[in-house]
Image (cartoon, grey):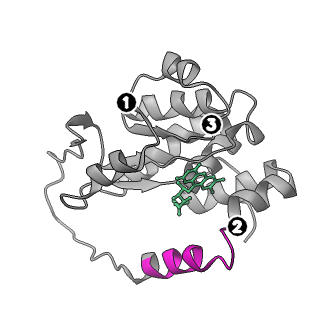
Amino acid sequence: MAVHPGPPIDLFDYELWAKERLSQAVWDDIASGAADEMTVAGNRQAFDRIAIRPRVLVDLSRIDTATSALGIPIDAPILVASSAGHRAIRPEADCTTALGVGRAGIAMVAAAGSNRSIEDTAGVATSPLWLQRRTDVLKALAPRPRVFMIGRPILWGLATSGADGVFDVLTILQRGLV
Ligand SMILES: Cc1cc2nc3c(=O)[nH]c(=O)nc-3n(C[C@H](O)[C@H](O)[C@H](O)COP(=O)(O)O)c2cc1C
């Protein structure tokens, strides 16, 4: 698939734009999975099995995607999954991601292998920043699947246009919910 002229308009565009901007080594790290990559393939298949039933002539004037996770209000049921190695994508690393995430009003999980200290990232974060502790994530998801985490699309946004790209990716996802 070729990159079209003009700004990216959906997540597939962001994937293509990010690929064009990153070295082969960094791109391969982001795009690949562990071992035989069975989970990456399985996730894709599971996602493709979900069909959206289009509705028309529905009142959209009072849609509110806001919810909460671990009792903390967030603007949409989306969490930014922990991913290590942001410095390979942008020198400011996790701080830039946190700026885009903050603008979207969504919580971010800082990876154990973050390239910036938690103090640095917390210093610019304007939305909840969580540390990677397995029990916290499980607590967020256990009652019912009220929120979902995304990983790679955030990295595509970071690679394409920094905080603006992260924000735009989250906006695209949020709009997809309404
Ligand atoms: C480059 C990269 C680094 C990652 N680092 C971590 C990590 O440090 N800790 C972790 O729990 N998951 C890590 N993950 C997994 C992501 O949190 C997420 O589960 C995975 O990317 C699947 O979500 P996605 O299909 O939206 O990308 C990483 C993923 C990528 C692509």
C-alpha span from label 2 to label 1 = 28 Å
Question: Mark number for residue 61?
Answer: none
65 magenta-colored? no
* Ligand 1 has an atom within 8 Å of the beta carbon of the residue at disc 2: yes
What is the three-letter code of the residue carrying label 2?
A: Ser
- Ligand 1: quadrant of the figure: bottom right
Q: Quadrant of the C terminus?
A: bottom left
The residue sitting at 86% across, 51% down in the picture is: 23
Q: Please, what secondary structure does the residue beneath circle 1 have? A: loop
Q: Which residue lies under the disc numbered 1?
A: 128
What is the three-letter code of the residue carrying label 3?
A: Ser
Count of marks placed on residues:
3
Position above or below: 50 against 6: below
The residue sitting at 37% across, 57% down in the picture is: 176
Task: Please give left or right for residue 164 compared with residue 88 in the image.
Answer: left
Q: Position of residue 113 (x, y in %)?
A: 63, 41
Q: Position of residue 125 (x, y in %)?
A: 47, 23
Q: Residues within 10 Å of mark 2 (few under 14, many from 20)?
A: few
Q: Name the N-terminal-most of marks 2 and 1.
A: 2
